[in-house]
Image (cartoon, grey):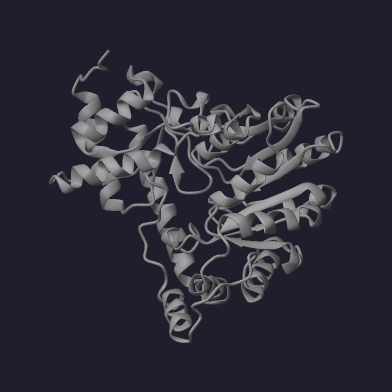
Amino acid sequence: MLHTVAAFDRIGEENAFAVLARATLLAAQGKDVINLGIGQPDFRTPEHIVEAAIKALRDGHHGYTPATGLLATREAVVRRTMTTTGIEVSPENVVILPGGKPTMYATIVLFGEPGAEILYPDPGFPIYRSMIEFTGAAPVPVPIREENGFAFSAEETLALITPKTRLLIVNSPANPTGGVTPKSEIDKLVAGLEKHPHVAVLSDEIYDVMTYDGETHHSLLNYPEIRDRLIVLNGWSKTWAMTGWRMGWSIWPDQLYDKIRKLAVNCWSCVNAPSQYAGIAAIDGPQDEVEKMMRAFDRRRKIVVEGLNSLPGVSCITPKGAFYAFPNIKDTGWKAKPLASALLEDKSVALIGGPDFGILGEGYLRLSYANSEESILRAIDRMDDFLRSGATQKS
């Protein structure tokens, strides 16, 4: 029998991909599947971005790039950061990575080890906890509560910090809830962190431009008092509908930059050159397609909230960011994962059960409205039929 490293038994998964695989299989069998599970915009990558990659290929950009990314790509991120936050960063603090997850992995591996504690949002993106457990560190969930509009509480977060805490992970606008944490709460968090200089912060800001109803994203880059221990995660996937391009960036403090550079050399060498040229075009090119996509998400958001609140036993607060709704299904009589499974198998509607995002996810489903209005309306109708049919949870 093969001997494997025990740490790999602690690696979890992102169940959205398992649901995607099952939904794809059912569709291949002829089922009319409506996928509201995966967090992927249904829009095409804007044409000028695609053309930039094609041009890069034709111009001969076929070789390795620096491990931290092309200087031109990093400079584009600097310009974009100035535009969205008003903060000037150096290209020597920017790393280009193959998606957002490598930043999570790199950060958690840097700080996680047996005896350490890492705080992460619950419910939250499942890879946070998975990677924390992989390192042997103790995962400490920060409750993300519906009664707070799915924003984190600074007081509750700070109360969880101990001398063993190495890293705090925050995410706003948030996956899976669509919550946006207000500036007042972020101010309190940063002020409290001054008493805990041993705690680094990973701020996952991948949905930074996706806010609604006058809400504004407040980047932790705006707080110079924590810049020397702050890592910011961002990327191209959501904003420019570039999920399959695997393009992310992160901003690192000086003391950690060479560590992430060496990890890049060891793990993925570099990000492919044509995608990086596409990334430059995305940042520097016209943003009208992004604005069009956001208007569509806003319309879908309103349809989703109205539709979910019309379902028996379901309630849903209005998400303020990203493209997810997190409806409360506690009054349906169903547990979340069995309900999500039954809706997929019986009604061909793919959703994600809340427990896939953490212990506090029980009683909720995640619905992505990164799909067409027509598909969303048909999915709501199917959910309504199922919940009114008297179907009961199998033991």
Q: Residue furthest bottom?
A: 59
User: Which one is in front, 38 or 191?
Assistant: 38
Q: Position of residue 121 (x, y in %)?
A: 60, 34
Q: Can you say which quadrant of the picture contains the C terminus?
A: top left
> In the rendering, at what x and y percent does residue 128 appear?
57, 38
Please tell me which residue is depicted at 73% across the width and 64% down the height of the picture.
Answer: 86
Q: Residue at x 40, y 56 (%)?
A: 41
Q: Which quadrant holds residue 331?
A: top left
In the image shown, does 346 or 127 lie closer to the viewer? 127
- Quadrant into which the N terminus falls: top left
Q: Is residue 228 left or right of residue 60?
A: right
Please provide percent x and percent y for residue 162: 78, 25
At x 83%, y 53%, the residue is 224
Residue 110 appears in the figure: yes
User: Left of 66 or right of it: where is 49?
Assistant: left
Whether residue 284 is situated above or below residue 18 in the rendered picture: below
Q: Nearer the viewer, residue 99 or 270?
A: 270
Number of residue marks: 0
- Is residue 305 visible from the viewing direction of this image? no
Which residue is located at x 67 percent, y 73 percent? 75
